[in-house]
Amino acid sequence: MKASEKRINKNLLKYWEKLFNANGCIPHKSSVNPEEINDIWSNCFIMDANKIDYDFLGKDVKAIKEGNSLVVKDIYNSLLCPDNSNIKYIVKEVLTSKAPVSHDSSFKNPYGLTIKYRRCFLPLRGDNDDISYVLGCLRWKSTP
């Protein structure tokens, strides 16, 4: 997907809407094709909503989770860690509303940096056709 839009959450939402419109219902996890969104796939993740655990982490998201710096660890803990962030609340909101949830915001971390981020969470159906997965994305940058 070579979109002129630079906001990752809008690009992923546009892709999800394409899948939704093709079937007339919330897309199945198996319908997600990384090749169709290869320009943003490294910033994407798929979460098992029942376990609140990740089935897939894109390369850039995985780098945040496994990062060595305190700043990167703080970003993961604040924005994606199922235990230390509002992820459980967001996943519950996606499951209840059966609709996308997007955040475009910032926060000041303990090290004095402002972290600006964009996140998007989109419902996906699982094997039993229940909404049991969330397709998401994250991009961030830090400024002094």
Image: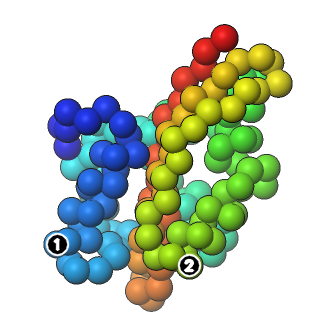
Q: Quadrant of residue 89?
A: bottom right
Circle 2 crowding by C-alpha within 10 Å: few under 14, some 14–19, many from 20: few
Residue placed under numbered mark 1 in the picture: 22
Residue with the mark numbered 2: 96
Helix, strand or loop at label 2? It is helix
Q: Percent position (x, y) of residue 74?
A: 74, 32
Instruction: Tell whether 79 sits left or right of 60.
Output: right
Q: CA distance from mark 2 to mark 1?
A: 23 Å
Dot 1, how many residues are within 10 Å of its Cα: few (below 14), some (14-19), or many (20+)? few
Residue furthest toward the bottom? 128
At 22% across and 49% down in the image, what residue appears?
Answer: 36
Residue name at image x 26 percent, y 36 percent: 5
- Looking at the picture, how far across and down is residue 35, in whole percent? 24, 47
Q: Look at label 2 and name its amino acid.
A: Thr
User: Measured from the top left, where is residue 26 in percent x and y?
Assistant: 34, 76
Q: Classify residue 46 as left or right of residue 113.
A: left
Q: Quadrant of the N terminus?
A: top left
Tell me if residue 112 can be seen: yes
Can the viewer see residue 69 in this picture?
A: no
**Residue at (57, 38) in percent of width and height:** 105
Give the image location of residue 106, x and y in percent. Answer: 62, 33
Given the current orientation, which residue lies at the most extreme right position? 110
Camera-side residue: 131 or 96? 96
In which quadrant will I find the C terminus? top right
Tell me the element at label 1: helix
Q: Earlier in the sequence, mark 2 or mark 1?
A: 1
- In the picture, measured across the screen, residue 75 lies left or right of residue 93, that is right
| Residue at screen point 18% across, 37% down | 2
Tell me if residue 37 comes above or below residue 99 in the rendering. Answer: above
Going by the numbered disc 1, the residue's amino acid type is Ala
The correct choice, above or below, for 62 with respect to 122 in the image is above
